[in-house]
Amino acid sequence: MTEREKMISGQLYDSADSELVNDRNICKDLCLEFNSIPFSHKEEGKEIIKRILGGIKGDFFITAPFWCDYGYNIEIGNNFYANHNCVILDCSPVRFGDNVLIGPNCGFYAAAHPIKAEERRSSYEFGKPIVVGDDVWFGGGVQVMPGVTIGSGSIIGGGSVVTKDIPPGVIAAGNPCRVIRKI
């Protein structure tokens, strides 16, 4: 099994593997290219995003700057919008449903590291998938941690740190993020 296959399947993998380093370099170069395009050149920007992301279901708009690690592990649904400074660490799959709105300065972090310090000193890490349902809205500054699923129709309040699954149809906020009420 290759390090890339281990990475995508959630196993401990060597992030210094030459194939993964090359994949990240290609992705980061494309992100830099996207982030350097004048805002008025929207179609040119969309074409670069199509080269970065692994799956695009329909219409989308991502406002620069945008950064991700590999891109091929990210899938977005129809009518997807991400505001400025979206960061997606996609060593594991990160999937967004339809009609997802992401405020500025949000991060989605599928990457995780070993608990033991001696293991963390190596280049080994692992990932846990992030899944976002349809019709989810993220306020500004939300951070979503590895392995989280957010149910359809939910709203995540600005500044929240989402460490656990959020059910569908709720307003949730805080650090750690918790359900405030049903919608």
Image (spheres, rainbow, N blue to C red):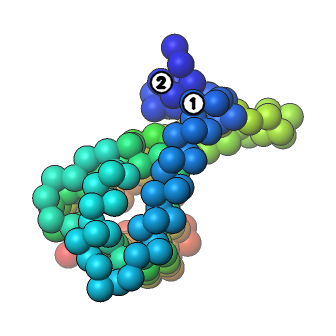
Along the line of sight, the residue nearer the viewer: 114 or 1? 1
Q: Which residue is mark 1?
A: 19
Amino acid at circle 1: Glu
Q: Which mark is residue 182?
A: none
Q: Quadrant of residue 63?
A: bottom left
**Is disc 1 surrounded by few (<14), some (14 to 19) or many (20+) residues within 10 Å?**
few
Q: Which residue is mark 2?
A: 5
The CA span between labels 1 and 2 is 11 Å
Q: Which mark is nearer the camera, 1 or 2?
A: 1
Along the line of sight, the residue nearer the viewer: 26 or 90? 26
Amino acid at circle 2: Glu
Local secondary structure at mark 2: helix
Instruction: Say if residue 108 shows up in the picture.
Output: no
Say whether residue 109 is left or right of residue 153.
right
- The quadrant in which the C terminus is found is bottom left
Tell me whether the residue at label 1 lies in contact with that at label 2, contact meaning CB atoms closer than 8 angstroms.
no
Along the line of sight, the residue nearer the viewer: 90 or 160? 90
Say whether residue 162 is left or right of residue 77.
right
The residue at the point 52 percent across, 40 percent down is: 23
